[in-house]
Structure formats: structure tokens, C-alpha cells
């Protein structure tokens, strides 16, 4: 029996095929149309329906490359289930190299949206209607904010057994139990019954080989866990640390920052992480860890003011948790 085709927008994708779809968003003042680009991989055999999305924040470009490399590895005739890949959700922000939409709204605070609201609200509603509503699992790809870098990590509701199993299957170096934010895609998707992983890695406006490779391999592990592809026999994921509490070490003064720690370092409370100096190189004060854990984020800005976030440390749960 031939599997039913997959409907999205105004088209249907037949079983065993991949197809690019343009979902209309708006029209520019110059008359050009702006659309949401989607690649649907509709497997020949039955299975789950999963989405992957990138660039909800337009300057977070790593997810675009993760999805490009991911879909290049998939063969529709050998695929089970359906993948809906949306490499760029915030199309206008992405084209401008800007985190936000032209009206300065944060798209990831605009879900579930409305068909007659602001531009952000309309894009959110389109994404919820055409993508999330058709899927049971989603992986949303992010990077650190401007002038920061993140260690590859999964953020998710680790108290939900199904979501936790998906996070463990992804196999990132760290998985963080993360609270929900009102208006976020993760919150809106959970409200309609989808299980969501949020992947954080790398820096804004920059491709970085390690976070990209970790993202591609991690999503493929999730697809294998769901039975959509065969597992890679050569893939041997390392241990995943669990964190239920994170916090930023903040500058206690103003100066030029020189960090002596890097992403992935395991630190103890009181460890020296770096120092602040004046413009002549005189040390103003040291930067020390305020908790024990693993460094999952840090600033790339050399000039800091009192109160600025410098190093993000995730407290690590015991291995037998």
C-alpha cells in the first residue's frame, strides 16, 4: 500500500520524495514576495513527523548550515516518516544579519501568533499552522547572543520522560533542564503536544565546524532513536552531563577582560577564570567561579562594565542522578 502524500501549504509531497516549498509571508514595499523556505522529506515508509528549524533569531546562522548538511544525508526512498526542515524562520532578520524583525520584535517571543497580528505574530502563526501542527517532535537550533559563545548543549524539559529520552539520544556534551519562556516556540509547541529540544551552540553570525557537526550528528541520532533512519554503527557518543541550574559570573568592575577558561572546562567554586585590567595592563581584579560546574557559555567582548555577564557555568548533577 502506497503511503499517503504529505500536505503543506498549497502542495502535496508524495511518499519517497523530497520537495522544496515556499510558504508566503509578506510582500516587500518594492513588490517582491517574502516566503518561508521549507524542505519536506516524506519517506516511503510510515513513521513520526519531525521538524527542525533554524534562524528564528536572524543572526543565529549555525542552524542554517546544520539543516543544510543534515538534509544532504537523507534519502527519501530509505526514510521512514517525515521531516519538515525550515532552515530560516526569521527570513527578514536573516537577510539583514539582525536578531530581530524589522519592527524590532523578537520572533521567539511571538508564538503562537495570530493571522492578523504584527508581522512577527503572523510568521509565528504560519509556522505553528503549517509546521508544528503537523509534527510530534521538533528540534529548534540556536546560538549564543551577540558577542557570546555557547558550548553545544540541549535545553529541554528533562522532567518529561519522552523529552528526556530524546535529549539523551541527541548526545550533546550537556543537557540543561530549562524553564519555559512565554511566547517562545518551545512553549507554544508544548502547549499543542509536541516534544521539543532546543539546541544551543556557537556564536551569532558565524559558522563554527564543531557546533555544526555536533548538531548534524545529534539530530541524526534523534531520527535513529525515532526509527526514521538506521543508526550509524560507527557513532560512539561521549557522555552527556545533566544540569538543572546555571548562572553567569558577572564582572565586579570595569576593565579589559582576559579569560583564562574556555568552553567545556570543568571548574570548581573559587577557581580563577581570568582577570580585568586597565588600558595600561594593570590588573583591576580577578574573575573567579561562583559555583562548581562546566563552562557552557562565555563572552567574546574584551571590554566589560561592572555587572556584565562573563562566564556561564552549569552546575552538574551527580552521574547516578
Image (spheres, grey):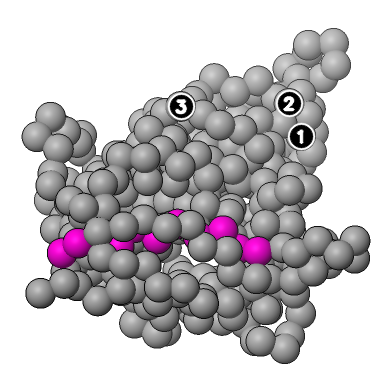
The reply to whether the magenta stretch includes residue 37 is yes
Per the model, the C-alpha gap separating discs 2 and 3 is 23 Å
Per the model, the C-alpha gap separating discs 1 and 3 is 28 Å
Q: Mark 3 or mark 1, which is nearer the start of the sequence? A: 3
Do the numbered discs 2 and 3 sit on residues whose CB atoms are within 8 Å? no
Asked if residue 141 is positioned above or below residue 212 in the image, the reply reads below
Q: Residue at x 69, y 42 (%)?
A: 146
Q: Tell whether 307 sits left or right of 201.
A: right
The label number, if any, that marks residue 87 in the structure image: none
Foreground of the two, 140 or 91: 91
Quickly name the residue at label 1: 304
Which circle, 2 or 3, is nearer the viewer? 3
Q: Main secondary structure of the magenta part?
A: strand
Q: Residue at x 51, y 77 (%)?
A: 10
Dot 3 alpha-carbon crowd within 10 angstroms: few under 14, some 14 to 19, many 20 or more: few
Residue segment shown in magenta: 35-45
Q: Quadrant of the C terminus?
A: bottom left
Quickly name the residue at label 2: 302
Q: Tell whether 144 sits left or right of 5.
A: right
Dot 2 alpha-carbon crowd within 10 angstroms: few under 14, some 14 to 19, many 20 or more: few
Dot 1 alpha-carbon crowd within 10 angstroms: few under 14, some 14 to 19, many 20 or more: some
Q: Mark 3 or mark 2, which is nearer the start of the sequence? A: 3
Instruction: Identify the image quadrant of residue 193.
Output: bottom left
Q: Is residue 116 visible?
A: yes
Do the numbered discs 1 and 2 sit on residues whose CB atoms are within 8 Å? yes
Per the model, the C-alpha gap separating discs 1 and 2 is 6 Å
Q: Tell whether 208 sits left or right of 175.
A: right
Q: Residue at x 52, y 52 (%)?
A: 87
Foreground of the two, 244 or 253: 244
The label number, if any, that marks residue 209 in the structure image: 3
Asked if residue 36 is positioned above or below residue 12 in the image, the reply reads above
Q: Quadrant of the N terminus?
A: bottom left
Amino acid at each position: 500500500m502506497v503511503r499517503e502524500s504529505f500536505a503543506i501549504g498549497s502542495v502535496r509531497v508524495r511518499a519517497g520524495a523530497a520537495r522544496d516549498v515556499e510558504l508566503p509571508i509578506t510582500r516587500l514595499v518594492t513588490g517582491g514576495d517574502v516566503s518561508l523556505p521549507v524542505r519536506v522529506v516524506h519517506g516511503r515508509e510510515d513513521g513520526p513527523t519531525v521538524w527542525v528549524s533554524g534562524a528564528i533569531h536572524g543572526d543565529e546562522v549555525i542552524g542554517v548550515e546544520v539543516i543544510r548538511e543534515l538534509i544532504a544525508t537523507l534519502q527519501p526512498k530509505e526514510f521512514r516518516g517525515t521531516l519538515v526542515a525550515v532552515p530560516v524562520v526569521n527570513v527578514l532578520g536573516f537577510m539583514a544579519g539582525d536578531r530581530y524583525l524589522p519592527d524590532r520584535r523578537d520572533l521567539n517571543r511571538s508564538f503562537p501568533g495570530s493571522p492578523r497580528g504584527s508581522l512577527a505574530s503572523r510568521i509565528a502563526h504560519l509556522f505553528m499552522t503549517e509546521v508544528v501542527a503537523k509534527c510530534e517532535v521538533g528540534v529548534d537550533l540556536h546560538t549564543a547572543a551577540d558577542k557570546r559563545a555557547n558550548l553545544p548543549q540541549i535545553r529541554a524539559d528533562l522532567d518529561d520522560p519522552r523529552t528526556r529520552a530524546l535529549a539523551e539520544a541527541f548526545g550533546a556534551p550537556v543537557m540543561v533542564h530549562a524553564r519555559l519562556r512565554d511566547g517562545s516556540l518551545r512553549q507554544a509547541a508544548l502547549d499543542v503536544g509536541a516534544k521539543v529540544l532546543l539546541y544551543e551552540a556557537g556564536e551569532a553570525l558565524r559558522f563554527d565546524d564543531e557546533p555544526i557537526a555536533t548538531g548534524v550528528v545529534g539530530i541524526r541520532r534523534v531520527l535513529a532513536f525515532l526509527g526514521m533512519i538506521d543508526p550509524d554503527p560507527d557513532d560512539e557518543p561521549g557522555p552527556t552531563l545533566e544540569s538543572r541550574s546555571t548562572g553567569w559570573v558577572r564582572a565586579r568592575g570595569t576593565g579589559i577582560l582576559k579569560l583564562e577558561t574556555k568552553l567545556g572546562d570543568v571548574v570548581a567554586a573559587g577557581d580563577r577564570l581570568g582577570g580585568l585590567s586597565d588600558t595600561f595592563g594593570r590588573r583591576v581584579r580577578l574573575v573567579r567561579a561562583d559555583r562548581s560546574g562546566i563552562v557552557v557559555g562565555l563572552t567574546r567582548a574584551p571590554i566589560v562594565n561592572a555587572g556584565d555577564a562573563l562566564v556561564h557555568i552549569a552546575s552538574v548533577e551527580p552521574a547516578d542522578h
